[in-house]
Amino acid sequence: MVERKIYAFWTGDNEIPENRKRCFDSLNKTGLEVVVVTERNLDEYINRKDLHPAYYNLNLAHRADYLRAYFMHHFGGAYSDVKESTGSWVEAVDKLNESQHLLAAGYKEVSRHGVANVHQSSVLLGENFWARAFSYAKWRWLQLNYPRIIGNCGFIFKPKTILTEAWWTEMNKRLDCFEKDLEMCPAIFPREKRGQIYNGAESNYPIPWSYILGDVMQPLSLRYTSRILKSLPPPSFDDYL
């Protein structure tokens, strides 16, 4: 059963800016109960002992990537990035609840350029030639099939399905591999990216941008495409966060 709730996350300890508050307010257009989870109220939903040990060494965007997987797997419901919502999600929730077959709902990926670049992640990680060749073929296949994939910025999931289990398991496996590297090079800046220059020095933050969300979820979205409803209105991508 999917509850009529939509979750959004603000993972920093800073005050939410006015433009982002307007995005949160726009989530009322979905027709779902809006639940904004922040660092201040996270304990109401999760025992912090259950968070992955690497969580607080992640940049703020990757913390949100982690939390959306946690909530979608354990609780189910809807999720949205902090973006302007453009329409109702009620019908999609109802269709999921009426169907034994469907596992999730989302909006169709808007173009091939929106697909997670699994090849770039492989290159940034310094993987060998054959791993990079495989990742390139995988990326091109995802791009070719982008209309069959849902986007990363908003979706609805039934909890504890084969789809969320695969997503949750793979993401945690990846964080396990980076736990020690994150201890040595934790994120200092909110949206820190590997290889970029901050205050005159190159970041050694170890995790590529899409590695724990899009690189995991979008291939799964293609694998289970026949069991995913693709009827959600896409969010506004202006003032992207």
Image: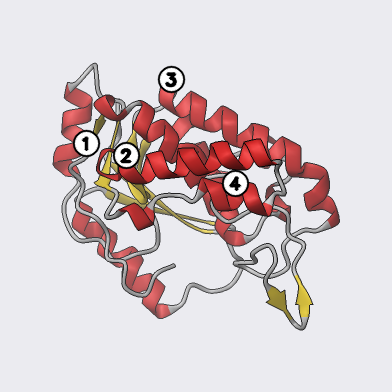
Amino acid residing under circle 3 = Ile
Q: Earlier in the sequence, mark 4 or mark 2?
A: 4
- Say which element carries label 4: helix
Tell me the crowding category of disc 1: few under 14, some 14 to 19, or many 20 or more residues within 10 angstroms, Cα based: many
* Image x and y of residue 228, in percent: 27, 31
Q: Are marks 2 and 1 in contact (CB under 8 Å)?
A: yes
Tell me the crowding category of disc 2: few under 14, some 14 to 19, or many 20 or more residues within 10 angstroms, Cα based: many
Residue underneath mark 1: 93
Q: Are marks 3 and 4 in contact (CB under 8 Å)?
A: no
Q: Earlier in the sequence, mark 3 or mark 4?
A: 4
Q: Earlier in the sequence, mark 4 or mark 1?
A: 4
Q: Earlier in the sequence, mark 2 or mark 1?
A: 1
Tell me the crowding category of disc 3: few under 14, some 14 to 19, or many 20 or more residues within 10 angstroms, Cα based: few
Q: Nearer the viewer, mark 3 or mark 4?
A: 3
Residue underneath mark 4: 43
Say whether residue 229 is left or right of residue 223. Answer: left
Gap in angstroms between the C-alphas marked 2 and 1: 7 Å
Q: Nearer the viewer, mark 4 or mark 1?
A: 1
Gap in angstroms between the C-alphas marked 3 and 4: 27 Å
Q: In this orientation, which residue lies closer to the viewer: 172 or 134?
A: 134
